[in-house]
Image (cartoon, grey):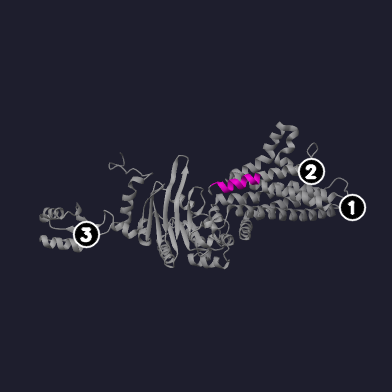
Amino acid sequence: MITAQNLSKRYKKKWAVDALSFSIDTGKVTGFLGPNGAGKSTTMRLMLGLDNGGGQTLFDGKPLCAHSYPAKTAGILLEAKAFHPTRTARNHLKVLADAGGISAGRVDEVLDMVGLREVAKKGPGKFSLGMSQRLGVAAAILGQPKYLILDEPANGLDPEGIAWLRQFIKDYADAGNAVFVSSHLLSEMAQMADDVVVIGRGKLITQTSVQALVTGSGHSGVLVRTTGQTQAKLKEVLESSRLQFTCDAKGFKVQGKTTDDIGKLLYRAKLPVLELSRQEASLEEVFLELTASSEEFAAKSVAKKGGRQ
Amino acid sequence: MITAIKSELRKVLTVRSTYLVFIIALLINMIVSFWTSGYRVDHALDTHYLQNSIIALISGIGFFVGITPLLLVTHEYRHNLIYYTLTANHSRTIVFLAKLAVIAKYALVFMLANMLFATLAILVGLNLGDHTLPAQQFEWWPLLWRSGFYLLAVSFMAAIFGFVVRNQIGAFVVYLLYPGTVEALIGLLIKKNAGYLPFRAIATVIMPAQGDFSVNKSAVIAAVWVVVGLIVSWLLFLKRDAN
């Protein structure tokens, strides 16, 4: 387990990370979400001891640097282009293998795993962003670490690469490891993360499972659609049952109840039902709702009239 | 520590610039050795001719020895390799010491290679120029310690610039301008005390100039500068964020 305790980092008068605590379980993919400037990268750097700040992060009860071979405990990918442009991909990994006390034979194994064997003798300076990310992933898994900390690993990957990465991350976690991954691709995160840590302005907003986050959102509920003539009566029934609901063009969305509950209620009220279905909020909807007040660099919407405001 | 040294050594050996700089320095050394100290030599050759020529040539190519250490340090920041370097090792101090160990090793190999090829080039030049070299006497200890000290000190100073400035171009500009231009200007201001300046002291160890301090005193002054510089670099390396 990784335990981050009271992480803090201040740049002049501004807190980039403010008393942030959370934990990451093994066997799971934990997504790290937050708006731009929320402090995600700084948090990761603090966890790894790259930045000086307050708090501590324990990997199985001790700081990363206290492990015999830190590279065999935590693999990292913080920057896609973190390599010397003319040092070959293989030599780049050999340098890291030497530093981490990892056998040189592992280098070719990971190059095979990420599909870069054919370009192993080339300098990565001319690699595409996607290939660079793959090299970064290779570097992260070189020491077969129990923990992977990945900052935006899907950036620049093509759809095939993203699918590969998603499966790779899920398989890695399923093998009993922990993967802590930040990404702006919320649809991807929804597909691969088990838990999420959401931060805004350097503070923890929530840490929970993706399922609980989505289910508990106001955007989730049971959609009920009835005929135009019986809409008023449906509203009356829902109000009299003291249910929480919203109404829009699609119909009524009732929160906190199952389709069975609502079906029985409508049956008793003898209302015609055109649609009765469970509606789950998307992770994106929940994320935007959670971080609405934490957006530091939110763009203004384009004006409706010819782009002028 | 051994793993850190292995990694740092591989860093040096797997970039083109290391070989490029090494070969350029060697070529310049050999051409100058062959031509001015060998083929076209125009004065009487004494029994210490080879030793003095080698020392003069080592001092002439001192600038080149610092380039690789400077790049070893600043590549970390320019290419963000510092993330990997620091997270793969127990402590920043180990990384710092490993870099110094590799820099020292590089400086010594640089010295031995240049001494060997300078000697060969001088001998070939003298032979082709029909000059007769009297039997040579070598004072090995002064030759080796003064050359070694000079190249080590220059290498460490270049690394110090790298650790302090971190920006590769910035550190390179400082390394280009400080020893010659800036120290020369400061030397004009402080006159007699110019021997206390770091690069002046380092240079005096290998090529004592009239009016400067003795070789031993200059070596102590240079060593103090290098040690203080390394301590400052180490503290900054520990305290700064790795970016």
Question: Which segment did they paint magenta?
Answer: B229-240
Q: Where is residue B2 in the image (x, y as percent from the top left)?
A: 63, 60
Q: Position of residue A128 (x, y in %)?
A: 48, 57
Q: Position of residue B145 (x, y in %)?
A: 77, 50
Q: Quadrant of residue A216?
A: bottom left
Labels 1, 2: front one: 2
For the residue labelled by badge 2, is the local secondary structure a helix, a strand or a loop? helix
How would you rate the neighbour count of disc 2 (Cα within 10 Å): few for under 14, some for 14-19, many for 20 or more? some
* Residue nearest the observer in this picture, A203 or B241: A203
If you read the primary sequence from the N terminus, does the residue marked by circle 1 or circle 2 appear first?
Answer: 1
How would you rate the neighbour count of disc 3 (Cα within 10 Å): few for under 14, some for 14-19, many for 20 or more? few
Q: Which amino acid does label 3 sit on?
A: Lys
Q: Residue B134 carries which label?
A: 1
**Is-magenta flag for residue A104?**
no
- Would residue B96 be seen by someone viewing this image from the given angle? yes
Q: Residue A257 carries which label?
A: 3
For marks 3 and 1, give the CA distance.
Answer: 105 Å
Residue drawn at (69%, 53%) of the image:
B104
For marks 2 and 3, give the CA distance.
Answer: 90 Å
Q: What residue type is labelled 1?
A: Pro
Q: Position of residue B220 (x, y in %)?
A: 74, 43
Q: Is the magenta stretch mostly helix, strand or loop?
A: helix
Label 3: chain letter: A
Q: Name the residue under label 2.
A: B215
For the residue labelled by badge 1, is the local secondary structure a helix, a strand or a loop? loop
For marks 1 and 2, give the CA distance.
Answer: 27 Å
Is residue A259 left or right of A168 when viewed as pictured?
A: left
Q: Which mark is residue A209?
A: none
Give a yes or no on whether discs 3 and 1 share a subunit: no
